[in-house]
Amino acid sequence: QVQLVESGGGLVQAGGSLRLSCAASGTIFSIITMGWYRQAPGKQRELVAVISSGGSTTYGDSMKGRFTISRDNAKNRVVNLQMNSLKPEDTGVYYCNAVFQTSSHWGQGTQVTVSS
């Protein structure tokens, strides 16, 4: 059983910063990628950022230059997402995702609200 526990969401003013963390636990043999997706009300879930086991990163277009995804080297099952220069359009539920060799898992989601 794999669990993804997210933390760090909240309310912030436009221009502010938040840091999200996601920790994977359970029976894990090989993580291929871990990352974040978000879903705003009435919109489809979209890519925020992912990081591969080799350290390569991919960002959604509107996040480039503002968001940074990283792994905790001491805890290779933890990924962090530093979000700077937040905009009201960044508001949504942010979901952690982990892809393993034979399965994909989602966290419960954490709310991020950016006020104007």
Image (spheres, rainbow, N blue to C red):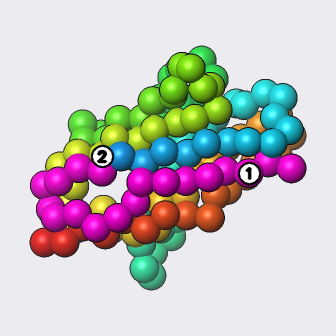
Per the image, the residue denoted by label 2 is 83
Give the magenta range. Answer: 1-18
Mark found first going from the N terminus, 2 or 1: 1
Question: Is residue 12 shown in magenta?
Answer: yes
**Quick one: quadrant of the C terminus?**
bottom left
Mark 2 crowdedness (10 Å alpha carbons): few <14, some 14-19, many ≥20: some
Front-lying residue, 72 or 98: 72
* Tag 2: amino acid: Met
Label 2 – label 1 distance at C-alpha? 23 Å
Which of label 2 and label 1 is nearer to you? 1
**Dominant SS in magenta:** strand
Question: Does 79 appear above or below 43?
Answer: above
In the image, residue 33 lies at what x, y percent? Answer: 64, 34
In the image, residue 99 lies at what x, y percent? Answer: 71, 41
Q: Quadrant of residue 53?
A: top right
Q: Identify the residue shown where x is 62% and y is 25%.
A: 76
